[in-house]
Amino acid sequence: MTDTSPTQATITVTLELTADDARRILVTALQDAARASADNALRAGDSSDPDVEWAESQERQARAARALAQTVEAQLQTQTAGPEGQE
């Protein structure tokens, strides 16, 4: 049998991002991941047959994502402020 489905066209997109743009995207993705993991942990705890280990791993992932997001945000704030006296 031969696949006769049409071939998907390839689309190339070029983005010009600054380092700050990339960091902000990273922070947003980390915050979204933290929220999703925290939500997963809550749902697992509300289940009639909770998987405690999985819920705990989701909580750990949420904490790690939040910590990374805070670290990147702090770096952004430090770079945005610039050297002292040059604001």
Image (tube, grey):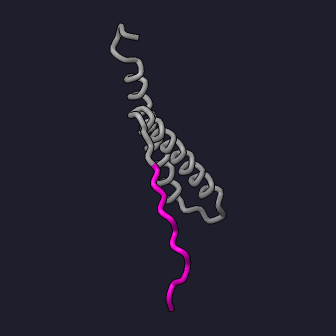
Q: Quadrant of residue 19?
A: top left
* Left or right, 12 with reference to 43: left
Q: Quadrant of residue 50?
A: bottom right
Magenta span main SS: loop
Quadrant location of the C terminus? top left
User: Residue 40: x, y in percent?
Assistant: 58, 54
Q: Which residues are magenta?
A: 1-13
* Left or right, 24 with reference to 43: left
Residue 61 higher or lower than 7, as above or below: above
Residue plotted at (64% across, 61% down): 47
Residue extending farthest to the left is: 83
| Residue in the foreground of this view, choosing between 46 and 40 | 40
In magenta segment, residue 18? no
Residue extending farthest to the bottom is: 1
User: Residue 70: x, y in percent?
Assistant: 45, 33
Residue 31 higher or lower than 48, as above or below: above
Residue plotted at (51% across, 92% down): 1
Residue 9 higher or lower than 29, as above or below: below
* Left or right, 3 with reference to 68: right
| Residue in the foreground of this view, choosing between 80 and 11 | 11
Residue 30 shows up from this direction: yes
User: Residue 7: x, y in percent?
Assistant: 51, 73
Residue plotted at (45% across, 54% down): 12
| Residue in the foreground of this view, choosing between 64 and 14 | 14
User: Residue 51: x, y in percent?
Assistant: 55, 62
Residue 71 shows up from this direction: no
| Residue in the foreground of this view, choosing between 5 and 70 | 5
